[in-house]
Image (cartoon, helix red, strand yellow):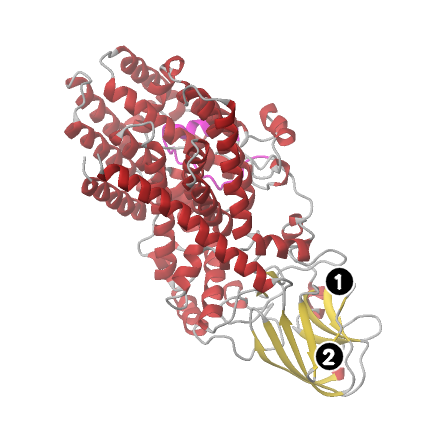
Amino acid sequence: MGPWFIVAVLTIEAAAFIVVADLVPFARGIYHDNYHLSYPLRVLVSTALSDGVMPLWDHWSFAGGPFVSPATATSLSPLVAGISLFGVYGFGSFFCEVLLTHLFGVIGMVLWLRGFAGKMPTLLGAVLFGLSQYQAIQAPINVEGIASLAGFPWLALGGRLALEGRPSGIGVIALAAWQMFTAGYLGVNFVAAQFIAVFVLAERLATGGPTNLRAVLRGVLFALAGVALFVAIFNFPILEAWHHYNLDMTQIRETKVDPFEGSAQLGSLRSLLFPNGLSSFVARGPERAHIAALFIGAIGLFFVVYAALGVRRDRRVALLLVMAVVAFCAMLSREWWPGRFLTGAIPFFDQIRYHGWHAGTVVFFLAALAAAGARRFFDADEPRPAIAAVVLMVAASPVLLLTGDARSPDISRFIEFPQIWTFLGFLAVAFVLRHRVRLPVAKTVLLLCLVELVSTSFQYVRLSGRINVRPSPAVIAENERLKVAGFGPAENRRLMSAPREKSQYFAKQPAVVAYQPFAHPVGVRLAGDRALRDRLDHVFYPTERDGKPAMAMADEITIRRLTTASAEVEVLLSADVAEFVWSSPFTPNWKLTVDGAPHETRRTAHGLTAFELSSGRHDVVLQYQPPYLVPSLIVSGLAILFALALVLWGVRAKFRAWRHR
């Protein structure tokens, strides 16, 4: 199997991903959180970079907050920053990032699996991983989901290399975490990293052969060095979170978090074999638990079962199976005791809002199990395990189809699932050849896997379509026209009454989307208090003694420039005011000058920014100046270069060894 075949397989897999993820036409495929959060944030980043402004503060979401913090570190994402250098983000740019993120994960899966699965099983496992229902549904809705998932195999690969004493593992861990934590889900990353670390260490101890304690400790130190190098790359977001949130990241979302909000039901197991018309985003019951998407294809599940039947012979398979089961338990609602136990046992686990997002971790381990099972199947001469796996799947199929959310009135619906016919065709090929699957047939199996998953695309599209929050063509055209205007003068009145898609990102008009008295305004949703909202619907305003806005005292308030790092406003007041308020969350990182002279700011009772201002005309300038900004960026840049050097040194050493063979 040559490199051209691998490239061809990955190209076909990427094309299939586009089909099943409903990304064509892509403008129609961006909706839900991608349209209202992920895509607009990238537009804001690219606009700032094209105007020569570093994106440090986001006025346009959560009532204002540091752009570079662990929760919104989009501007430091390598893919986002790299693509933004080519101009202001458009739908094509976003499509490019989604596709590159997807390929990043699939290639990482290939590199990780080939260490134990063989050539063809490796490609099969990578394809199952890349075309899983989790990725296909998440892509047009939440790009953060696939950004996190794409880093899992790279973390596992880096951990393996580090524990083997290879310095390149340090760089792989650091760079993988950099991509995950700048573009993915924060909580999912924390928990998945713990699962992967446990697996990698257990794998080394169980399958690494005779090794002394010194070698193990050296490998652990290498892995910890990779984590330390990632912290060096990520030091600025961490410092910003410390300065602004005091590292209490719960302020970014609702302050009272139910750890089982959006968790999964035990019925998620039904989605292993067939999609069954299930959506991973439909809340069900008082627990708000839902059926999570675990589908990796009937062929994939066949190989998982095949691997599990030989678990006693393979320690790695046993570890993968245990990790898949534990990760699945971590998704469950409070109805099931494993979820309650893990809440107290796993660090950061009780701070995560949506446990159902851990379906990606389960899919990761299942795809690896399928690759291990495929290797055993390709090498086996004994047909009995394969027959047993087929019997188990055929026996389970009617039960899965006729249970609960499968919504199948009778067994005749069995034949309506196209992946069934692909699976049966695969079995026919395998048994006719008496399990001596040679390379050409292995390629056929891989092609059947692609056909099976692509054939379910109509179900994927229907599932994704349930979240029907898409922009109209007219809104898209207006947004695209406005966003290229850059950062210019802005209106002083927030566009609270405008449609949501026009209110914040593209028109560069900040909107109060988060505010509640006596609580930090960042991330606390406006709770329908129209009177409060109307009082605070200006970017700048003077107040009376009681703190209420007094717009009548201001003859003129003109915002001349509002960027992600500055605010410039000209004010004409007819009388002295108690306070002049900038309705952005207070932080000492904003430095104020009035008529060119430094001026003090203070926090209002509502957590906003206020300062004294006398009557007359004034030029007010605010500049975002985080402490240690330049040293932080230097440390990040040097850490990135060092991580890349470690990876390239490992690639060079491997290339030289291959050349001398």
- As for residue 274 lying within the magenta part, the answer is yes
In the image, residue 17 above or below residue 384: below
Instruction: Determine whether, in the image, residue 55 is placed left or right of residue 134.
Output: right
Eye-nearest disc, 1 or 2:
1
Residue 417 visible in the current orientation: no
- The residue under the point 80% across, 70% down is 547
Q: Position of residue 371 (x, y in %)?
A: 32, 28
Closer-to-camera residue (230/418) = 230
Quadrant position of the C terminus in the picture: top left
In the picture, measured across the screen, residue 618 lies left or right of residue 199, that is: right
The kind of residue on which mark 2 rests is Met
**Residue beneath label 1, please?**
606
Comparing 52 with 582, the one in front is 52
Tell me, yes or no, whether the highlighted magenta stretch contains residue 469. no
Q: Which image quadrant for residue 394? A: top left
Q: Which mark is residue 551?
A: 2
* Residue in front for this viewpoint, 512 or 222: 222
Q: Position of residue 638 (x, y in %)?
A: 49, 56
SS at circle 2? helix
In the rendered view of the protein, which quadrant contains the N terminus? Answer: top left
Point out the stretch of residues depicted in magenta: 265-285
Q: Earlier in the sequence, mark 1 or mark 2?
A: 2
Rendering coords of residue 216 (x, y %): 49, 27
- For the point 46% across and 41% down, the residue is 170
Tell me which secondary structure the magenta stretch mostly adopts.
loop
Q: Residue furthest right?
A: 545
Q: Residues within 10 Å of mark 1 (few under 14, many from 20)?
A: some
Percent across and percent down for residue 38 are 48, 56
Which image quarter: residue 484? bottom left
